[in-house]
Image (cartoon, helix red, strand yellow):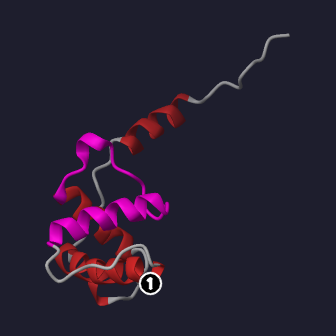
Amino acid sequence: MACQAEPVAPESVYHLKVLRKETPLKLKHEAELFKAAMVAGVRYAEQRGVVEFEPTDSASEKLLYLYRLLVHDQLIQPLPEEQVAEKSMRHKLALWYAKQLPKDHPLLKA
């Protein structure tokens, strides 16, 4: 008994290909969102009890730890390992924080 798949309309296949090639979501106030995301991320990690950041910890160390923690907790989608860089992790954290804000928040206004 052969299994037959339903035919897929060419438009929907094209649509999927276009969606995959979309550019990353642009955030007008990404720097401010990132700063707020770092504060919220540090608070989240410390309240969860998995880490206690020291004042001597660099922002880069905190960023990498928070990125890995949020991926582990499945709160953000992981980047391909070759794309894990400070700029892309900053963007991911800013997006994570932006999604938690109300729609009318000043940082989300264009």
Q: Secondary structure at mark 1?
A: helix
Q: Which residues are magenta?
A: 58-86
Mark 1 is surrounded, within 10 Å at the Cα level, by few (under 14), some (14 to 19) or many (20 or more) other residues, namely few
Decide whether residue 101 is among the magenta residues. Answer: no
Q: What residue sits right under mark 1 in the picture?
A: 47
Can I make out residue 56 in this image? Answer: yes
Q: For the point 41% across and 36% down, which residue is it? A: 17
Q: Position of residue 32 (x, y in %)?
A: 20, 81
Residue at image point 33% right, 62% down? 67
Compared to residue 45, the image places residue 10 above or below, namely: above
Q: Is residue 110 visible?
A: no
Magenta span: helix, strand or loop, mainly?
Answer: helix
Residue farthest toward the right in the current orientation of the protein = 1
Amino acid type at image mark 1: Gln
User: In the shown orientation, is residue 95 left or right of residue 34?
Assistant: right
Left or right: 23, with 57 as reference point? right
Q: Is residue 57 left or right of residue 44?
A: left
Q: Is residue 89 above or below residue 4?
A: below
State which quarter of the image contains the N terminus: top right
Q: Is residue 19 left or right of residue 5?
A: left
Image quarter for residue 86? bottom left
Q: Is residue 76 magenta?
A: yes
Name the residue nearer the viewer: 66 or 5.
Answer: 66
Please name the residue shown 42% across and 73% down the image.
50
